Image (cartoon, helix red, strand yellow):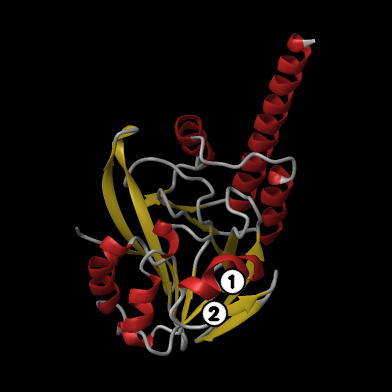
Amino acid sequence: METRISEIADGIYRLSNSVESAASPDGFTFNQFLILGDEPLMFHTGLRKMFASNRDAIASIVPPERLRWIAFGHFEADECGSMNEWLAAAPRATPAHGEIGCRVSLTDFADRAPRVLSDGEKIDLGGGKLVRFFDTPHTPHGWDAALVFEESTRTLLCGDLFTQFGDKSLSLDGDIVGPAIVAEDILKYSALSPGMGTTIRKLSVLRPHALALMHGPSFRGDGAKALVELGDEYDRRTRFAIDQLDNRDMGRR
């Protein structure tokens, strides 16, 4: 397995593994992100079987033992499956996640005690890099779901938001929402809830210049507009699902 490397913003690297997908001939990517600084942060660890390839990729940028922080969007194999391998490779690294994720999963799973982050908390990585943590429960799925925003480059590390097929490294065509809707129709991976659209739209106030997708290309452009459009789409889907249930109940009466 080969891990491809691309710098998506100043000091932020995308480490991408492409696999075949039965759902699409375009394939599917698993992306990890490295934010440099005096205390480098890795967002997503990748699956355990991807560890060796990802470790070699990071080693071409920075010695793995220099990693200081390991964070992720939610507790799931592709998000943090190789966390303990990374903790062994980076003795100074600390796993960091929100209170729910730490209480429910991380405190037991991680070989090193995690740093519990509160909603909106900032970590100064040094070297001009500052990240802010945001709780996004159940958005797009997972009680412990969360995102990270790097302030100097205005890069939002989106986790599973905007998931799409294909192995392009960068999207510049202005449409990051359309392909995400296609993937949602096929995979149905989101946990629809009444608050989902609002949660996504609130992120638009960050006005990100770049969106770093866990599954799909990184995007440069009007990130706020894309987040509003995606939030509106999930509101539409939620209303449709509720209407379908109401109609089903009416049919039983």
Residue occupying image coordinates x 58% and y 84%: 124
Q: Which mark is residue 102?
A: 1
Percent x, y of residue 98: 62, 69
Residue 90, x across and y down, in percent: 36, 85
The residue most toward the left is 1
- Looking at the image, residue 40 sits to the left or right of residue 102; the answer is left
The residue at the point 51 percent across, 40 percent down is: 189
Q: Which mark is residue 114?
A: 2
- Classify the position of the C terminus by image quarter: top right
Q: Mark 1 Cα within 10 Å, few/some/many (few <14, many 20+)?
A: many
Q: Position of residue 240 (x, y in %)?
A: 69, 25
The answer to whether mark 1 and mark 2 are in CB contact below 8 A is yes
171 left or right of 160 in image:
left
- Secondary structure category for the residue under label 1: helix
- Compared with residue 16, is residue 191 higher up or lower down, i.e. above or below? above
Dot 1 or dot 2, earlier in sequence: 1
Query: Disc 2 residue type?
Result: Pro
Residue 129, percent from left and from top: 53, 80
Q: Quadrant of residue 228?
A: top right
- Could you tell me how many numbered marks the image carries? 2
Report whether residue 4 is seen.
Answer: no
